[in-house]
Image: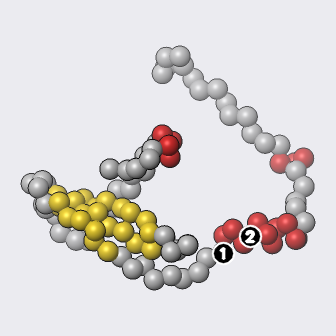
Amino acid sequence: MPATNPLKPAIGLDYSQKRPVSNEVYDVLARFFDRQTVRLDSRIEATDDSSPHWVKEKVSFAAGYGGERMTAYLYLPRSARPPYSVVGQMGGAGTFYRRSSP
């Protein structure tokens, strides 16, 4: 289908036919959004300063559950001063099927 064709309208849910869950069910579902304060415990795992445009840092921090850590890559520009603007990027759906990340 060419990109010039209009998009088909999304099929929405008819919420007028939906009924609220019980208080007991709501309480269980609401627990998924509970959170607790955890120490960030940030670490610089590796630094790559081979680019003339930025310094790449692989950093990790506490995920907040199960003692696991999250990994992020920071590209710190050489031609700007803090505070930096943030650009977040996440891989597509195929990312979840990879055995490892770069």
Is residue 49 in sight in this rendering? yes
Q: Is residue 9 left or right of residue 49?
A: right
Figure check: 56 above or below 12? below
Taking depth in this image into account, of 32 and 84 the one nearest to the observer is 32
Taking depth in this image into account, of 84 and 54 the one nearest to the observer is 54
Residue 19 lies, in percent from the top left, at 90, 55
Q: Residue drawn 76% across and 66% down? A: 29
Residue position for label 2: 30
Q: Write down the quadrant of residue 78 in the picture.
A: bottom left
Q: How dense is the environment of label 1, judged by Cα within 10 Å: few (below 14), some, or many (20 and up)?
A: few
Q: Residue drawn 50% across and 81% down? A: 38
Instruction: Find out whether the residues at labels 2 and 1 contact each other: C-beta distance under 8 Å.
Output: yes
Figure check: 95 above or below 86? above
- Which secondary structure, mark 1? loop
- Which secondary structure, mark 2? helix
Residue position for label 1: 34
Residue 33 lies, in percent from the top left, at 66, 70
Q: Is residue 30 left or right of residue 68?
A: right
